[in-house]
Image: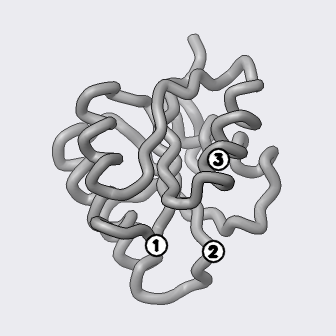
Amino acid sequence: MPIRLLVVDDHPLVRDTLTDALGRSALVDVVGVACDGAEAVEAAVRLVPDVVLMDLVMPVLDGAEATRRLLALLPGTRVVVLTSAVGGRLERAALNAGAATILHKDAGIDAVLDAVVAVSPGGVNP
């Protein structure tokens, strides 16, 4: 069965590109998208994805806090943070909140797919 994936990013181009590129893989079923952290938590509760690909810097609710809230409600879901920020408080906060791994947005789509597969239930954490 494909990995149920929720894509979260406040930039429509990034969100749409990730959704399209990852959706082409037979390994992934993109079950939804969200444009901020609050919407991500709501969508995750409704859709129960295996993995959430979470932007870190977003309006309304940042990715670290969204990760904390989401995992409190859905502890079996895994979160891969994808960010343009390098190091710093928000990355540490995301890891402390339970994010499985952090990738930078300069990673290629293959690296993102590999991370999603690796952290998914039954995968091997990178």
- 1 and 2 marks in contact (CB < 8 Å): yes
Q: Which residue is mark 1?
A: 57
Q: Quadrant of residue 50?
A: top left
Q: Quadrant of residue 83?
A: bottom right
Q: Which residue is mark 2?
A: 84
Relative to the observer, which residue lies in front, 77 or 25? 25
Is disc 3 surrounded by few (<14), some (14 to 19) or many (20+) residues within 10 Å?
A: many
Residue at the limit of the structure toward the left, as seen here: 73
Measure how far apart labels 3 and 2 are at the Cα level.
16 Å
Residue 4: image x %, image y %? 50, 25
Colour mode? one colour
Q: Who comes first in sequence, dot 1 or dot 2?
A: 1
Q: Amino acid at mark 3?
A: Ala
> Does 78 appear above or below 31?
below
Secondary structure of the residue carrying tag 1 is loop
- 3 and 1 marks in contact (CB < 8 Å): no
Q: Which residue is mark 3?
A: 115
Secondary structure of the residue carrying tag 3 is helix
Residue at position x 32%, y 27% from top?
48
Q: Amino acid at mark 2?
A: Ser
Q: Amino acid at mark 1?
A: Val
In the shown orientation, is residue 119 left or right of residue 36? right
> Does 89 appear above or below 13?
below
In the shown orientation, is residue 71 left or right of residue 82? left
